[in-house]
Image (cartoon, helix red, strand yellow):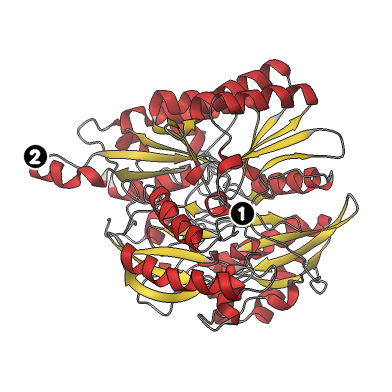
């Protein structure tokens, strides 16, 4: 990587422009210049290479097989059928392995080569979707409770989340100049950013909106969380949470996952000024000297929650009311059909690891293309990506419901009807072969891991046990592994840290149970715990709660007093 610090690169970038145009035009290499590899993240893309081919290409004296991941900015994961079809065409034309639904309700494309990067960006924007600020040291895609369920208040919360996302976008026109050929205006300050400043935030920043009783966004894992309080169908306000985050570094006790703390209660009208105050406080107070200590969670732990609250109140001009009690039931998705009060139906489909492609598990890309086309022809419905890597086909009339039901069966998309609860709720990050940070497999390993753990559950009569399993290729935690009742965190090829004991509401972190173990050791460790659970669990007791009660692990308590059954 460049000898320049990330802060230096941002400061000298002329509003995130850098030398990206020159890098893109260089035909000699499939890579960008080193500083531009940092800057392109703010445009929604990461440079990667195929790690499966690294050694083969090294021996052949070829440069790595460089390509780019592109991530959309889709607040709340809402897409019209026409947009889904457009993004499907992007995947079919430019990317590898179809589309992928992320844990932040975005669409990712993998394997885009440099000479097609600009054309891909243009095609995404032609779908009225953009990628600006989907990565980088800025507020990223805003996560919102995905399933419409039965409340009109969901639409209000989504609208506020979308407005906040727009408010927190960088002001720079670099994105539009580089990817969409907008002419640069002479004069003016290319780096004028009233919210972010010339060096943006110290690190990435994540916002999530939850609507109890579901915590499908894992709101306690967000830098900034808003928990909606409803009076019937009226949104009365939000409990504000700050300081959540999953990332850590193996062997470094000064880095750690953390659950967000309650900061206070606000009315809907106070949302944007309070959110802006939180972001600018982190901009000015966050650690810019050590990047692994630069997330908001470390800022709060360094200066204290009370000091941070005072800072937010001073910047916003708003005195926060005391936070309200929260009542969450679980942090997974609700699969199958649900109906809203307006008679419209919503179908949540299970998509393993969020990967939408045709294969033995179903004709996912073809089938969802057919569903999108049918909804477009009917003039109704929308696609909602969930923070658990699944997909909701939402807002359907009885006629459209029947059509979608038939297409789901035709293309084998009814995995949710056959899958165990373990498989329905499992999460996995991309990991190998494309993620540069991955230490072990995740997405590619998940099906085999599920088979083996399901076999153990079968042996003890627990096939229908609703256990949340998560796997991450590294401790950065994109699959939110530290909130899994069972979680594997990559340590080395084929080896993981086994984490146990999170709760099913996303309100308690798990704890290390076995360090640096392989599959055989993982299964050997789980077998007696599953056997004990089958024999000694209480009525309705979840696996993570059982492990804590029995003293198998002793996780650090989270903000439990605010989370009521």
Residue 355, position as x, y percentages in the image: 47, 39
Q: Quadrant of the C terminus?
A: bottom right
Which residue is more in the foreground, 125 or 351? Answer: 351
- Crowding at mark 1 (Cα within 10 Å: few <14, some 14-19, many 20+): few
Residue 112, position as x, y percentages in the image: 36, 33
Which residue is more in the foreground, 346 or 183? Answer: 346
Q: Which residue is mark 2?
A: 60
Residue 342 numbered tag: none
Q: How far is mark 2 from mark 1, CA to CA?
A: 49 Å
Q: Residue at x 80, y 33 (%)?
A: 344
Q: Is residue 267 left or right of residue 9?
A: right
N-terminal label among 2 and 1: 2
- Crowding at mark 2 (Cα within 10 Å: few <14, some 14-19, many 20+): few
Asked whether residue 137 is in view, the answer is: yes
Whether residue 116 is situated above or below residue 526 in the rendered picture: above
Q: Nearer the viewer, mark 2 or mark 1?
A: 2
Q: Is residue 342 left or right of residue 220?
A: right
- Please identify the residue farthest to the top as the structure is shown: 377
Count up the numbered dots. 2
Whether residue 378 is situated above or below residue 203 in the rendered picture: above
Q: Which residue is mark 1?
A: 194
Whether residue 441 is situated above or below residue 77 in the rendered picture: below
Q: Are marks 2 and 1 in contact (CB under 8 Å)?
A: no
Residue 166, position as x, y percentages in the image: 66, 44
Element on which disc 1 rests? loop
Q: Residue at x 77, y 45 (%)?
A: 149
Q: Quadrant of the N terminus?
A: bottom left
> In the rendered image, which quarter is residue 53 located in?
top left
Q: Residue at x 43, y 56 (%)?
A: 11
């Amino acid at each position: 990587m460049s000898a320049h610090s990330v802060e230096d690169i941002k400061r000298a970038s002329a509003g995130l422009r850098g030398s990206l145009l020159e890098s893109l035009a260089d035909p000699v290499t499939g890579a960008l210049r080193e500083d531009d590899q940092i800057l392109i993240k703010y445009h929604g893309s990461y440079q990667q290479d195929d790690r499966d081919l690294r050694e083969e290409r090294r021996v052949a004296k070829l440069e790595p097989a460089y390509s780019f991941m592109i991530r959309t900015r889709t607040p709340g994961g809402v897409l019209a059928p026409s947009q889904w079809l457009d993004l499907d065409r992007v995947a079919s034309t430019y990317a590898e392995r179809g589309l992928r639904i992320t844990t932040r309700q975005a669409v990712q494309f993998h394997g885009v080569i440099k000479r097609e990067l600009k054309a891909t960006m243009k095609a995404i924007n032609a779908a009225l979707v953009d990628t600006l600020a989907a990565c980088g040291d800025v507020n990223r895609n805003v996560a919102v409770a995905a399933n419409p369920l039965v409340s009109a208040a969901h639409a209000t919360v989504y609208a506020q989340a979308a407005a906040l996302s727009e408010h927190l976008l960088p002001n720079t026109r670099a994105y539009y100049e580089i990817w969409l050929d907008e002419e640069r205006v002479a004069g003016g300050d290319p780096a004028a950013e009233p919210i972010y400043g010339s060096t943006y935030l110290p690190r990435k920043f994540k916002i999530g909106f939850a609507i109890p009783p579901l915590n499908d966004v894992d709101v306690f894992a967000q830098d900034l969380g808003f928990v909606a309080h409803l009076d019937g169908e009226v949104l009365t306000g939000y409990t504000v949470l700050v300081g959540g985050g999953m990332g850590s570094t193996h062997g470094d006790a000064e880095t750690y996952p953390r659950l967000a703390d309650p900061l206070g209660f606000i009315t809907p009208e106070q949302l944007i000024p309070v959110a802006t105050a939180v972001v600018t406080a982190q901009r000015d107070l966050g650690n810019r000297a050590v990047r692994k200590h630069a997330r908001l969670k470390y800022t709060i732990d360094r200066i204290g929650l009370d000091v941070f609250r005072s800072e937010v109140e001073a910047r916003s001009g708003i005195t926060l009311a005391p936070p309200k009690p929260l009542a969450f039931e679980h942090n997974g998705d609700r699969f199958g059909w649900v109906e809203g009060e307006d008679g419209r139906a919503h179908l949540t489909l299970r998509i393993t690891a969020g990967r939408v492609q045709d294969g033995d598990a179903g004709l996912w890309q073809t089938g969802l293309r057919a569903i999108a086309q049918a909804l477009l022809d009917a003039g109704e419905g929308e696609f909602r990506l969930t923070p658990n890597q699944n997909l909701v086909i939402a807002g359907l009339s009885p006629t459209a419901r029947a059509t979608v039901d038939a297409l789901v069966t035709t293309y084998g998309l009814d995995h949710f009807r056959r899958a165990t609860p373990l498989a329905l709720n499992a999460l996995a990050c991309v990991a190998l072969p494309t993620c540069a940070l991955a230490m072990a497999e995740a997405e590619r390993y998940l099906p085999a891991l599920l088979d083996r753990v399901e076999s153990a559950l079968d042996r003890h009569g627990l096939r229908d046990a609703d256990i949340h399993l998560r796997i991450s290729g590294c401790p950065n935690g994109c699959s939110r592994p530290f909130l899994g009742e069972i979680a594997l965190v990559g340590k080395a090829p084929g080896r993981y840290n086994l984490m146990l004991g999170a709760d099913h509401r996303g309100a308690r972190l798990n704890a290390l149970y076995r360090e640096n173990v392989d599959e055989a050791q993982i299964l050997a460790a789980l077998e007696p715990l599953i056997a004990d659970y089958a024999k000694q669990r209480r009525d309705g007791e979840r696996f993570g709660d059982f492990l804590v009660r029995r003293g198998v692990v002793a996780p650090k308590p989270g903000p439990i007093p605010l989370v009521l059954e």
